[in-house]
Structures are given as C-alpha cells and as structure tokens.
C-alpha cells in the first residue's frame, strides 16, 4: 500500500521535500503540544508553514528546523510562531459550511426542542477568541436567516470575546474585504451588508445588534465564572496556544458554561484528546463537535 | 445462526427465485480466499490466474495502471507490469468490483455504482485502519467484511428495482438512515436480503454475520467483533461523506454506541483510541478511495 499511498494521497502537488519524514515528527510535536493535527493529506500545509518559518529563522533544512523547535531555548517562542503560520488566513466569514449545515439540520432543532420545553425562547452563544469578528458575524447572519423558519419566535444573543483590544475594535467595525468574504454568498452579501470604502463591505446594524463584543482573558478564572448558561460555544484555533494545564482549566470553564445538552465547537483539526473526558465527541456530516450531554443520557443516543 | 430471514419466508423465496442473481461468479471464491490472506502470502501467479478469468479485466487493469494517477515513466504493457504498478490489493479491489458489479445490469443500479463502491471500499479501508489501531488480530478480515457488508443493496436493486428507487429517494429526501427507510417501506432491510445472497454464495460465516447484523448490534451474536468493527466503520464513512450519496442529519456518538461497548471487550485498546485524530486520518483514506473508485469507473 505504501507506494499507492504516496501517489494517490494528496490532491495538491507535492515536492520530494514534503515527503520528508521529519515533517511527521514535527506534526506529532505540534499535536502533542497544541492539539492541532495534520492528517496525511493536510501535511503539505504544515510543511508549507515550516518552510516559511525556515526562511524567517534562516534554518536550512527540515531536520535543523526540528532541532530548533525542540531546543528548550527556542521551543516555546518558535512553536507560537509556527502556529501563527499554520492558522494564518484561516479566518474568513462562512468558513465551515458543514458546521452551519449541521447547526441547521441537527443541532438547532434539538436545542429548540429541549429549550422550548422549559419555556426558554432565547439562544445564548459564545464566540471565544473571536479575533476580528468573522465568526460571530457569520453566526449572527446565519441565525437571522433562520429566524423566519426554524427560529420563528426565538431570540438569540452572541457574546464575542477576545484577548486582543485591537482585534475587538476591528471586529466592532464589521468591515470586510474580498478575501474575508470569499465564502460569503451573494444572497448574504445583499441582505446583510452595506457597501463601504473601496471594495469593502460593512455588516449591517441588525446583524451587529445581536452581538456583544468584549475583551476577555480565557485564563482569568474570576471572569470566566460569569460566562454561564450558554447553548453553543465556539473556540476555534485558540486553545492551541495554551499549555496543557491551562487548556484543561479553560475547557473546564467551557464545560460549566454550557447548558446540557449543549455543543462546543473547536477548529477543524483540533482535538480534546487528553484535555477533557467530560465532553463527548460526536460526528455530524463532514464535521465533528463536542457535546455536553444531559447527565445520565449517555448511551441513549443510539445511532 | 438465528436469522431474521427465517421469519420472512416470503423474502427468502423472492430472493432465491431471482433469475438475475446467478450463483457466485467463478472468480469470487478464489478472490475472497486471496483477500483473506496478508499480501506477503500471496503469489503473483495466483493473481495472474485470477485476472485471466475475464478478458475485459486485463484491459481495464492496463488502462488504470497507465492512468495519470500512477504517473509511470513508461507505459505498462503486460499484465505483470500492471500488477506491479497497481499492487495486489488494488487488483483484488478491481476484480471484486467487477465480478460483483457485473451482476447488476446498468438499468437496475438503483444507487449510483460509483457511490456504492466508494462506500464499500471506503468502509473496507476504514475497517482495516480501525482494526489496526485497536489491535484487532485480523485486519485483512475486517477489510473483507467492510467491503461486502452492503451486498444487500445489490440484492434489493435487483429484486425490487422500482420500490427500492423510491426507498432511496425518500431516505435522501429526509436525510435518514437507509435501513430505517427500508424497514418502513419494504418491511425488511438490506441486511436481511444481503445475508441470503451471502449464504447462497457460501461466503465465510463471519462475513455473513456482518452482512446480517451490522445495523442491529443489540441482537447480533456475541463473539464476532467484526460486526462491531464494520458497524462503526460504516457509521464513520457515512459521517465523512462516503455514505449513500446524501447527508444523514443526526449526531453520532460512537463511544456511546452499543457496538463500542461490545468491541471494547474484545479489543481493550479501544478505550484509549484518539477518535478525533483517527477521524482526521480517515479523510486521507477517503481521498484515496475516491480517487481509486473514480478511476475504476471512469469512461474507457
């Protein structure tokens, strides 16, 4: 199988260097340290990020780069820089269509049924580490679009938090260029944006009205305790920057911040393996998420 | 074996009377014998012999070996060089898709054959990877089980072509599992019809059990971990876009599935598997399977 794996695996072109087994070591290192995983067909992305860092750090080959990233004196800083390279350009509006499809077809109907039963007709959503606002704005537009159908008679509010003040300010402005809008359909552009300077579009007030932006440090235990009663939490490519102890603590806060049943979404390649055994990994078409189940209901959801 | 089909004599009669279901294709049993063995125990001459069973196969193998997918420097001109290029596993896959697929006339395929084989080969590959990860003792058998688990879909397409078209359309429309829709509309599932064909063809008992029980873990006979492996592999494939050609709208909690509990008794390693990582790795398998199946079925 080995030869066919190489010739069949990746859709993007590979050069010989990207097959260097050193990248597998770097892959495992990144996964252990940060919880972000590159499968065989995504390895070229990691190799690309490493190469950009190699140019920057003037390291000659992947093997030396592995030394550089494992050496105690440079390890922590370089890992952070590499993660920046890995996640660069990942933010755009409507980044994950499978995630939105699953929200619409599986998760929202379930939440409406369970929350509706106790008379609550409001959904609370937290976008943790919202960066420049692409995620909360996407969610707000997506939920507004559902408000005439699934969510008729329901309200929703989105708490969008980030550590970085400047990101928050940018997010509040809601101005996006063509690159950030590359996945946004014309329907959404027409309905939820106004034209702004140059080729930029600005998110309409009705979209922003559902979002509260604020600065929050996820490791600030006191403030985290206030984030309660959430139905959905999104935290994409943020935990990867934390060490394992902080990661566990933050995820514990997310867990207690959610009402059951409630869902916790991570970035596409992130995993909670060995971080939390309270959340349950569930599969949805083309995506995965973590479920905070109603206590005692384990095993009840028989596929 | 306690078969549900014995409770459904009408179905058994209808399947056995099928004129279009011949006894097993000549190449099938020797092929299954090969599939059950680890590749290093297989001799080239056996493969060449199997390939020669059918004239069109040789031409097809050469076409695939010379496709851009394999990027050979010089074209493969003999069966031997095609076998070297493709590898024994791939040859077996192509043979199986041919000898089983040829049973179904073009107008009787209710499900698009490309979708069916993507699902079957995808499930085979996922079952084997999964079996290896959890240190199940016979990953090649898991491959075979995954490959043949949905034989009943072929039976249903042949025996109930028009009704089955409606079943598939209704299931796709509502994004619900195919077996549920079958049960509701036909009164039986592809498990019950598939096992009749499996038994008629004298497939190994363990594989027949997989065909019969992979959607009904709670009633499955204990002691055959292949059923649980295939059940879970099947669910994973359907969640990652290698299903029956549509998305099934539900959340699947594999670790809460009875098959998971059952399997962990046979394979203790299951308890520590990193399922998120495994799922991401599967996406690479899926790219491979899609490429392979599309090459097999690309126009000549």
Image (cartoon, grey):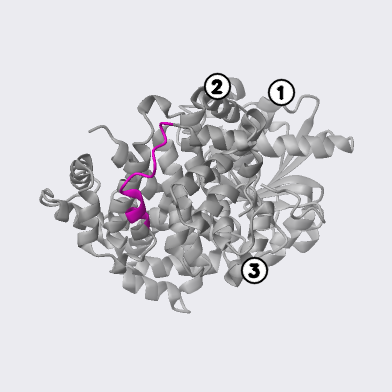
Query: x, y percentage for residue B37?
Result: 36, 64
User: Is A25 rendered above or below residue A181?
Assistant: below
Q: Nearer the viewer, residue B90 or B19?
A: B19
User: Is B3 rendered above or below residue A241?
Assistant: above
Please report the bounds of the magenta region as a residue range: B19-32
SS class, disc 1 = loop
Look at 64% across and 26% down and name the residue there: A204
Query: x, y percentage for residue B8?
Result: 64, 38
SS class, disc 3 = helix
Q: Is residue B30 magenta?
A: yes
Dividing the image into 4 quarters, which one contains the C terminus of chain B? top left
Q: Chain letter of disc 2?
A: A
B218 relative to A241 in the view: left or right:
right
Q: Please give the label number shown on residue B265.
A: 3
Q: Please give the label number shown on residue A187.
A: 2
First-in-chain label (1 vs 2):
1
Q: Chain letter of disc 1?
A: A
Look at 79% across and 29% down and name the residue there: A154
Label 2 packing within 10 angstroms: few (<14), some (14-19), many (20+) = few
């Amino acid at each position: 199988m080995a030869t066919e794996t190489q010739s069949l695996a990746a859709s993007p072109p590979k050069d010989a260097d990207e097959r260097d087994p050193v990248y597998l070591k770097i892959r495992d290192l990144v996964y252990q340290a940060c919880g972000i995983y590159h499968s065989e067909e995504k390895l070229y992305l990691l190799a690309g990020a490493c190469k950009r860092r190699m140019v920057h750090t003037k390291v000659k080959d992947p093997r030396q780069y592995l030394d550089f990233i494992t050496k105690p004196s440079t390890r922590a800083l370089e890992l952070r820089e590499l993660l920046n390279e890995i996640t660069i350009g990942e933010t755009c509006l409507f980044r994950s269509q499978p995630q939105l499809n699953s929200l619409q077809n599986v998760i929202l109907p379930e939440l409406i049924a369970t929350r509706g039963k106790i008379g609550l007709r409001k959904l609370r959503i937290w976008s943790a580490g919202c960066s420049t606002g692409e995620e909360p704005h996407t969610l707000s537009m997506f939920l507004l679009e559902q408000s005439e159908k699934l969510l008729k008679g329901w309200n929703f509010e989105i708490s969008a938090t980030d550590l970085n003040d400047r990101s928050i300010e940018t997010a509040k402005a809601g101005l996006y260029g063509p690159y950030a809008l590359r996945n946004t359909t014309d329907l959404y552009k027409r309905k939820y944006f106004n034209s702004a300077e140059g080729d930029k579009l600005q998110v309409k007030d009705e979209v922003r009205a559902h979002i509260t932006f604020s600065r929050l440090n996820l490791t600030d235990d006191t403030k985290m305790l206030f984030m309660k009663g959430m139905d959905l939490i999104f935290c994409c490519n943020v935990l990867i920057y934390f060490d394992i102890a902080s990661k566990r603590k933050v995820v514990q806060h997310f867990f207690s911040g959610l009402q059951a049943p409630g869902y916790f979404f991570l970035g596409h390649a992130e995993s909670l393996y060995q971080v939390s055994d309270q959340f349950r990994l569930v599969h949805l078409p083309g995506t995965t998420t973590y479920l905070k189940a109603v206590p005692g209901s384990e095993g009840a959801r028989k596929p | 074996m306690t078969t549900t089909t014995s409770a459904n004599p009408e179905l058994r009669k209808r399947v056995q009377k099928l004129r279009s279901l011949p006894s097993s294709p000549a190449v099938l049993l020797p092929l299954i014998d090969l599939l059950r063995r680890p590749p290093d125990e297989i001799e080239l001459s056996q493969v060449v012999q199997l390939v020669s069973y059918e004239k069109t196969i040789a031409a097809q193998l050469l076409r695939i070996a010379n496709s851009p997918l394999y990027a050979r420097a010089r074209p493969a001109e003999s069966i031997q060089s095609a076998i070297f290029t493709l590898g024994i596993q791939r040859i077996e896959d192509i043979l199986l898709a041919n000898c089983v697929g040829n049973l179904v006339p073009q107008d009787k395929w209710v499900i698009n054959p490309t979708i069916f084989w993507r699902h079957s080969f995808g499930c085979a590959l996922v079952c084997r990877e999964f079996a290896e990860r959890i240190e199940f003792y016979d990953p090649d058998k898991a491959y075979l089980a995954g490959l043949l688990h949905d034989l009943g879909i072929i039976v249903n397409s042949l025996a109930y072509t028009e009704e089955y078209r409606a079943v598939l359309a209704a299931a796709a429309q509502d994004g619900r599992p195919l077996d549920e829709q079958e049960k509701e509309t036909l009164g039986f599932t592809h498990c019950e019809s598939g096992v009749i064909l499996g038994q008629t063809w004298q497939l190994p008992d363990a594989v027949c059990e997989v065909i019969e029980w992979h959607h009904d873990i709670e009633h499955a006979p204990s002691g055959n971990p292949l059923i649980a492996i295939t059940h879970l592999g099947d669910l994973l494939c359907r969640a990652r876009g290698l299903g029956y050609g549509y998305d099934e709208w539900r959340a699947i909690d594999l670790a809460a599935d009875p098959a998971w509990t059952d399997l962990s008794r046979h394979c203790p390693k299951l308890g520590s598997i990193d399922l998120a990582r495994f799922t991401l790795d599967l996406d690479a398998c899926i790219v491979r399977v899609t490429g392979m199946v599309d090459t097999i079925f690309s126009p000549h």
